[in-house]
Image: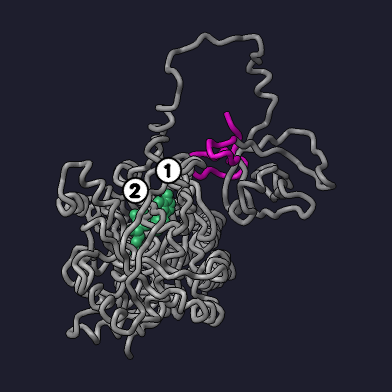
Amino acid sequence: MKKQTFYVTTPIYYGTAKPHLGSLYSTLVADVISRWQKLVGSDTYFLTGTDEHGQKILQAAQQAGKTPKEFVDSFIEAYQTAWNTYHIEYQQFIRTTDPHHIKGVQDLIIKLLDQGDIYKGSYDGWYCTPCETFVTASKEKLACPSCGRDTVKVSEESYFFRLSAYQDKLRAFYKSHPEFIIPKERANEVLSFVEGGLSDLSISRTTISWGVPFPRDPEHVVYVWVDALCNYITAIGYGDPAEKEELKKWWPANVQVLGKDIIRFHAVYWPAMLMAAGLDVPKTLLVHGWIQVNKQKMSKSLGNVVDPIELAQHYGPEEVRYYLMRQMPMNSDGDFSTGDLEQKITTDLANDLGNLLNRMLVLADKNGMHKVEPSDIWSPRAMDLRDKSFDAIEEYRQHIAQYEFHIALGHLWRFINAINAYFHEMEPWKIVKQDKEQFAQVISATAHSLRIVAVLLWPIMPQKMEQLLESIGHPFNIETDLLDSLELDIWKQTFILKPIAPLFKKIEDSRMEEKQPSQKQETVDTTNCIGIEDLTKVELRIGTIKSAESIPESDKLIKMQVDLGPLGMRQILAGIRKSYHPEDLVGKQGLFVCNLKPRKMLGYESQGMMLVAEGIDGKVHPVNPEGMVSAGTPLR
Ligand code: MSP
């Protein structure tokens, strides 16, 4: 059967600096989409590259004392190294200085000139160099509406693209293609811009020479945005008669990933140019928000620019990939903080996922179990986990299809917590002594579940998940590990288990220590000290959360059933709703005060108190033992 094709692109990055967190994010989103498409069986093409012409580059090169070409050449390696570091798997890295691109841009201009969509005039107005935008043709100077920076006066002969002639066609197109802009909220600003009336677009410059030479008029170079947008088609053969079939195969792009700051170029100018060229408009523009650092815009002057390479060296590239996809909602700006990143690595990756794999592998190994056959008859508890695994695949698939990565991952972690709860409840370390067959079943059910998790997470953390799959004897194979076969698998796999080094490392206190104001030992002020006899009055125990639900009357409280071992099951309320989804707590352990007088909150009795600590991210975190301990274990 012929595979479906899928073409995904990133914006091409200005060759004025090395990649930063924002460019990493756009590229990562495209890589995850491309890998996901491979998983659903598509023939996939992923394009990225650099935008190398225009006034901004020219000025930066002059400041650096280099020719523009030398200047842009100096950054290419940094991009390619960064993308390799982050395991970004693109098919082509296009540069707008590539001869095939230049030829393609010129072909398009010639076509539009010949059919009367381009005419000669003059531009007298203001230009924003950092955004490379003709801001306004008015006499009065305006700051750039997009970045707020100062504009410069431009008065020159210019070619114009008859954008105004496409206003109605664009409106009709948006109406008939509601899926064109995702998320939908972003479409409104595009629509109101078009409704406000479109003027023809200046598309050439005479006062700079660093650009694609304008066909038939050597005094002009092509306006850098027109040049740059064309990369999406020149990369796959536009302008080369020998590549006609290739162009037909991939165009229109299925998804073009971009940040909200460049939506107008992609949602207005680009479709109009394509309509004029007689080409289809891309199916979807996936527009992401802006990454802020500790709630502030990243900027050199604030000194908060995050270097992706340093980040990967410190935390690991796949940990960062996971964090960015989990943390940033597609429809709004997202906040980056190393505190959050560290917490996600420790909690989600090291504790919830890595630890589970490790416990299973080590336990099986200790008991001489290396080959695990599937069960013929699964226990009701294992069947329940199997059902949950099918639901997890379905939910994940649906959210990824909507590009809601953070929601998809949130759901998947609920399934991981369910596997943890199953493993913990079944107590395989005890069963192994009485019933080897039951023990094998617990290991098998856990391994089946982990395999599903690993395949689903492969687009997010490809190398880590390949290691996981290797450790359970299912080396990843993109030809066979398709999502469909995962859905059809009714837990009939055999696993060959082999313990491996922990997949993820918890973040030790290296960073925290840096933040300690002083390491000097202070003398202790004893005014408020208590004696040991006072401390022993407080009965502190580790409890395992068996179930948790929110309380309709409160947006803070969660009601939990907590297993406290010898004390039995207790109902305990905690004000952690803002930090945790109730389902995420199930299977987790916490520290509880067990001899506090029961008290009623909003009509519900709380028979104890969970101890929590507020994190540097402002969220509250339950206090956990380092490893799993039996429910009810007292503290000493
Ligand atoms: N060269 C143009 C794009 C031409 S595409 C035909 C350009 N380049 S850029 O390097 O300035 O930005 C490229 C992408 O990085 C944009 O999608 C932009 O939104 C994204 N980001 C840059 N900084 C960002 C953040 N702080 N956060 C998220 N993404 C941001 O524009």
Q: Is mark 1 within 8 Å of ligand 1?
A: yes
Figure quadrant of the C terminus: top right
Q: Which residue lies at the image location 20% right of the left edge and 41% below the top edge?
A: 64
Q: Secondary structure at mark 1?
A: loop
Q: Which residue is mark 1?
A: 298
Q: Which mark is residue 169?
A: none
Q: Residue at x 44, y 42 (%)?
A: 342
Say left or right for 121 vs 616: left
Residue drawn 35% across the image and 54% down it: 154
Q: How far, Cα to Cα, is label 2 from label 1?
A: 10 Å
Q: Is residue 28 above or below residue 295?
A: below
* Label 2 close to label 1 by CB (< 8 Å): yes
The residue that mark 2 highlights is 20
**Badge 1: residue crowd in 10 Å (few <14, some 14–19, many ≥20):** many
Q: Position of residue 363 (x, y in %)?
A: 40, 53
Q: Nearer the viewer, residue 468 or 281?
A: 281
The image shows residue 314, relative to residue 454, as above or below, that is above
Magenta range is 614-636
